[in-house]
Amino acid sequence: MMFIEIPPSSTGIIILQVTILLIIDVAAFVGNSLVCLASYRNHRLRTATNIYVISLAITDILAAAITAPLSLGAIISRKWMFEEVGCQIQGFFTHFLIYTSMYTLSLTAVNRYFRIVKPQFYKKVFGGKRSVCILAAVWMFVALFVSIPPLFGWADFKFQPGVSLYMCILDFKSSAGDVTFLFLVLFFFVILSMTIIMASYIQVFRAIRQHKKTVQTSLNMPKRFGTVSVEEMKITRTLFILVLAFGICWIPVYSVVSIIRTGLGSTMTNTGSIVATYLIFLSSAINPYVYAFNHRTYRVEFKKILSCKKDHIVVPDIGIPQGGPSNLSIGRRRVNCQPENSAVASVLVHRQLAFSEVKTRGLERALVHLKNQGHLAAVVNNEPGCAGLNRTP
């Protein structure tokens, strides 16, 4: 198989091109790895909605680990140097990851619609493992869609700078096949995804606007509207920003490539190809920084991970009788405390107590709350370190 070479450039230009793409690639890999690690560390981030966020992070990690390094190698050598197998690998993942991301963003929009507009049906649609099953079905469908043309001999993955980006993409053996594939992508991924996203978010933002009007007309209105919290609205805004960022990066590139491949336009310049390549990989790098800016829980977890800090709290004087250190079990975590004297009660915290309860309420308020709810079996003496535990917050 013959591969088109990249037009020659000066050493300075090549260094600049490689440096920019390398920065984007590292930012995408590190940022999305932080998203996955934060979700693993903090159970509050393992929600039905965040399953789609994690899915996006995984696809972006694959892009940073597989497709971007191969493009970097091609830019450095000014030609494709990874043989046909490397082109097939990059070509498959280029199409697969982009289309999967589009469907995943559509699913986040549907998720927000049910969570904000139709909360009574939310658990029926997204409860249990349904979100994981839906994502698995999407991944299998997209993988099949991308695999069929080369498997049946209708197309090959080729490296064609000028015609497209600095990466391998499907090239059909006939112009009719090329046009048919482009229209299938246009309908099943671009138009369908954008229609679902726009229709869902229009309804969501109408519901949010109505909620704000309701709050303004009632001074006694609580911070929740039905079963939807202010936090859910912030999450919705964050996910909508992701959609905008992806659209800004991807839609112009897809439009230009489609015009060229259908014969309606001439080839892209060297500058056009490299800019288009940057935009595609930039769409993988943006998401984690959107989370960090708009989502407080992710932002806190990112800081903890980067500073190598572990979750810990300072526990007041609650211990076992007769002095010595005590262990307070909170969820799956145990924290030690040193009593100031031996006249301290024995405390047992329910094993399912969420660690976030303590972080949200503060230890003393959390213990009283859980005691009132029947999760805390304890006899708390009025020792100096335990002051306030018998008071209602």
Image (tube, rainbow, N blue to C red):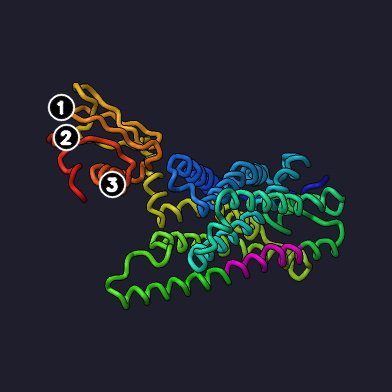
Please say if the residues under marks 1 and 2 sit with CB atoms less than 8 Å apart.
yes
> Residue 47: horizontal and vertical position, in percent?
49, 50
Secondary structure, mark 3, is helix
| Amino acid bearing label 3 | Asn
Sequence order check, earlier mark of 1 and 2 = 1
- Does 87 appear in magenta? no
Camera-nearest residue between 31 and 171 = 31
Label 3 environment density (alpha carbons within 10 Å; few <14, some 14–19, many ≥20): few
Q: Main secondary structure of the magenta part?
A: helix
Q: Which mark is residue 381?
A: 2
Compare marks 2 and 3 and give the one earlier in the sequence.
3
- The correct choice, above or below, for 241 with respect to 84 in the image is below
Q: Residue at x 17, y 37 (%)?
A: 386
**Distance between mark 3 and mark 1 Cα atoms:** 23 Å
* Element at label 1: loop
Locate residue 81: give its quadrant.
Answer: top right
Sequence-earlier tag: 3 or 1? 1
Give the residue drawn at x 56%, y 49%.
128
Residue 312 in sight in this render: yes
Q: What amino acid does circle 1 point to?
A: Ala
Q: Amino acid at mark 2?
A: Asn
On residue 372, which mark appears?
Answer: 3
On the question of residue 20 being in view, the answer is no
The numbered dot on residue 129 is none
Q: Nearer the viewer, residue 316 or 146?
A: 316
Q: CA distance from mark 1 to mark 2?
A: 8 Å
Question: Residue 260 is drawn in which quadrant?
Answer: bottom right
Marks 2 and 3 in Cβ contact (< 8 Å)? no
Residue bearing mark 1: 343
